[in-house]
Image (spheres, rainbow, N blue to C red):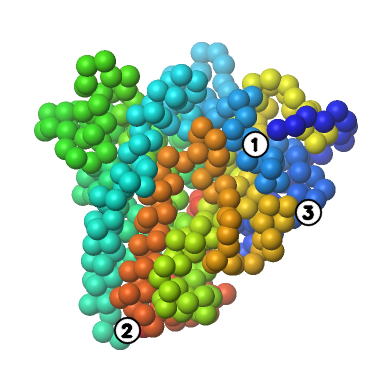
Amino acid sequence: MSDTEAVDPTGTVIDVPAPEPGSAGSPCGYARLRAEQPVVKAKLPNGETGWLLSRYEDVRAAFADPRLVRPLLSAWPPREGADAPPPCLPTFLEMTGEHHERVRRTVLPLFGRRRLEFMVPRVRAIAEELLDAMVAGAPDGTADLVPAYVEPLPLRVLCETVGLPYEERDVYLPHTLALLGASGLTMEEVLAALYALQDYASELIARRERAGEGEDYLGLLLAESRRAGATLTRDDVVSFVVTMLMAGYKTNIQHTGNALLVLLDHPDELRRLREEPARIGAAVEELLRYVPLMNAINILVAREDFTLHGQRIRAGDAVVPVPASANRDPAAFTDPDRLDLTRSPNAHVAFGHGPHACTGGHLTRLQLATAIEVLLERLPGVELAEPAASLPWDETTPLRAPARLPVRW
């Protein structure tokens, strides 16, 4: 991130651009900011202020800038004195320095494309099972993809890969969902959900330690933590479980629902994918770019003063890079508001960038590609049963998604 010298003295504070009705986010709302106010102070949903970064180059650089660190969710906004809460374990996104490097070296290989090959048949089997059940329960050839396919698929995949008990979802999901809607909660409510999720993860690990490790990610990491000379600790494994629940559940539901809606609303593109399934990989990358996976909830904190595009950012200020805006930046993508399932190259920042780029990116790609492929194989004539513009939306968290996806086949 390059510094500039001039400082804007106006002290302008804007509202975070609001999502357009019936959409996953607000990428169009950032067009003027990219052109006129690429770094601007905004009032965040929790009442704090932060510097919004809307240009691709600045967003990509911010994620890799050592002057910017992700704060502990339990410690931002900062509180001092006797009422300051005890710290929670950092998630993988919040780890810094040597601790982050040590854990990343151990965990990252588990999420590489080659390592994930073992999950391909299992993810496909889950998708086929869900669609077969949907079809069997729909003699009239119509159904809602959200409860039948979009919602259960990511959770089932997460449970299979991580080693979470699916039958205990009513225990850990309420805490997970509370944290994903944290912008509307008090700090006390956020902390209560964090502590509860951390306690659940610790108790689950204790059970797994008694039962034996197993071949899922939780089992593999526990075995590594017990290895002589290991640098991975039991607390790191607890953090892994919490991280996967926070980053791998609702975000994948949101993106899967939005991606399928985009495809169903572009029937010619859907037909081409059905006829040429080899194009699904490139289509997934474009859907990751085109659909706002995350809007304005990536909080970083400046460790020192610096100036960017005329704005003086002070140590302690929140900085908010917005991937949804960066992925629609015409300086980085030709005709960025157009869906182009053959776009190449496609260096989107849906998964962030730099040392804290999303570890589970390849798992997300695998899951979305499989969801599309199996849907087109099982239901080649699938189409929306209602106009896209009339569909209701789930707007209870920043991860907006269609509440219903009625289809016929």
Residue at numbered disc 2: 141
- Is disc 3 placed on a helix, strand or loop? helix
Q: CB under 8 Å between callouts 2 and 3? A: no
Q: Position of residue 308 (x, y in %)?
A: 77, 33
Residue that protrudes farthest toward the left in the picture:
211
- The amino acid type found where label 2 is placed reads Gly
Q: Could you tell me which residue is drawn at 70 percent across and 33 percent down?
A: 1
Question: Vertical placement of 233 versus 250: above or below?
Answer: above
Q: Position of residue 173 (x, y in %)?
A: 34, 46
Residue 165 as seen in the image, left or right of residue 395: left
- Mark 1 closeness class: few <14, some 14–19, many ≥20 residues within 10 Å: some
- The amino acid type found where label 3 is placed reads Arg
Residue 316 as seen in the image, left or right of residue 390: right
Marks 2 and 1, how far apart at CA: 48 Å
- Mark 2 closeness class: few <14, some 14–19, many ≥20 residues within 10 Å: some
Q: Could you tell me which residue is drawn at 51 percent across and 57 percent down?
A: 285
Residue at numbered disc 1: 61
Closer-to-camera residue (64/52): 64
- Earlier-in-chain disc, 2 versus 1: 1
- Earlier-in-chain disc, 2 versus 3: 3
Residue at numbered disc 3: 32
Residue that protrudes farthest toward the top in the picture:
82
